Image: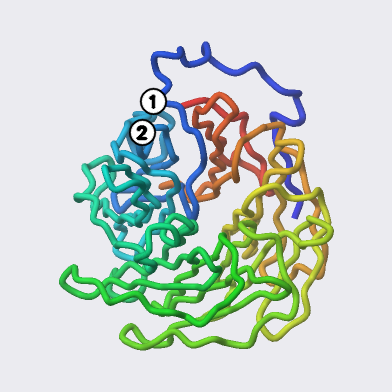
Amino acid sequence: MPVRSRRAARGRAPVEGAPLPDTYATLRARATAGGRWLVLGKDGRLTAYALGAEGVLRWTETFPGGPEWTGPELLPVPGLTHLSVAQGTNGFVYFAGRRVRHDESGEIVDLVSATQFQSGRPLTEWRSLGNPDRDPVKAAGLGVPSAAVGAGGLLHVVVRNFAGSLFLRCERAGGQWEPWQDLKGRRTHDGTAAVTLASGRVELLVPGTGLTLRLSRQASDGAYGRDHDIPFAHAPGTAVGLETAPDRVTYYWADEAMGTVVAHRPGTWAIPMGGSAVSGPVSALRALLGGYDCTVLAHRAQDGQVMFTAFGTENEGGGAWWSPTGEVCVGGPALAHDAYGRVVLALIGDDGALRVARQSGGPSLTLERSVRV
């Protein structure tokens, strides 16, 4: 599937507008969020989220399909160091973050969560999920959370502790939370890819030392079971999972040795996808292009440029032709559909601002020149 960017074809255009002044430092993103940080709300409006110096930054389309946006809007969360975003089938957006605070006893590290029920509306109160380690020294080594939303709109949060053991906490109906569960994963790293399938089943793909762990929860009230480990490692923090057939997930990640994209479906061989070495997470989206079911991938290359490709879904072996977009970003880019079904690419520029590029017409996947929001 040919892909190209009109910006790449015309050469890099200057950034619209002047850089944000220093007085607005709190409204500049300092990092992208984990998970799917560009989401389509129940009302047809896209919303993007990022991590700011003083909490969560949010941009929201003014009308379904754009092009105008509001934001960035600061949603204060003191001490937030990392953020993961997930969306349920109910359209609600769920947040899990790592927080660091200080008091007279020293440093306090915990996880926090909140929920947004409608696009552009206030979030619920941030609630502490605690820390699987109670010893303050060990608690300070808490990793970066990953989030998924299971059946019934219940949030699942997974994180490694200081020793690299994998822990999970799940929300119960009624807003209560299950105790921390030790998933028996050892020598794990940050960057778990959490995927919710259409059935409501949740899968976790966890970067380990020398291998990749895969876990799943078959029933909404059941325990997570460890599936067959994948006998090779991937670069931590680069993996994304996409349901490419009913109840079947394809994972895309950066090969630990070469750094280029690899596709893998459990029970099959890994498929090299070529292209440039990856820096940061891969983003994946299924889209109907020219009447064909296709998968679109995007990632940040080592030089900061966004690369993307499209191919027939589950036909990675047919080859992928990567195209530079002409965009430069920090962290990983995000992909989503807008209210009209167009593919939308979002990224955070090196100025800390959100940039958005939409699919134009035609049989191929062509992106219009991005605009700064």
Category of crowding for the residue at label 2, using alpha-carbon neighbours closer than 10 angstroms: few (below 14), some (14–19), many (at least 20)? some
Whole-percent x, y for residue 29 in the image: 47, 32
Q: Up-down: is 116 above or below 57?
A: below
Whole-percent x, y for residue 121 in the image: 22, 42
Report helix, strand or loop for mark 1: helix
Depth check: give the residue in front, 330 or 285.
330
Q: What residue does disc 1 label?
A: 26
Q: Up-down: is 356 above or below 101?
A: above
- Residue visible at 45% across and 14% down? 22
The residue type indicated by label 2 comes to Glu
The residue type indicated by label 1 comes to Thr
Q: Up-down: is 23 above or below 49?
A: above
Sequence-first disc among 2 and 1: 1
Q: Is residue 46 visible?
A: no
- Residue visible at 35% across and 41% down? 79
Report helix, strand or loop for mark 2: loop
Q: Is 315 on the left or on the right of 349, as rendered?
A: right
Whole-percent x, y for residue 217 in the image: 43, 83
* Circle on res. 54: 2
Q: Is 186 on the left or on the right of 7, as rendered?
A: left
Residues at discs 2 and 1 in contact (Cβ within 8 Å) = yes
Q: In the current view of this chain or complex, which residue is farthest to the front?
A: 105
Q: CA distance from mark 2 to mark 1?
A: 6 Å
Determine the image quadrant of residue 348: top right
How many numbered badges does the structure rendering display?
2
- Residue visible at 68% across and 44% down? 300
Whole-percent x, y for residue 87 in the image: 38, 59
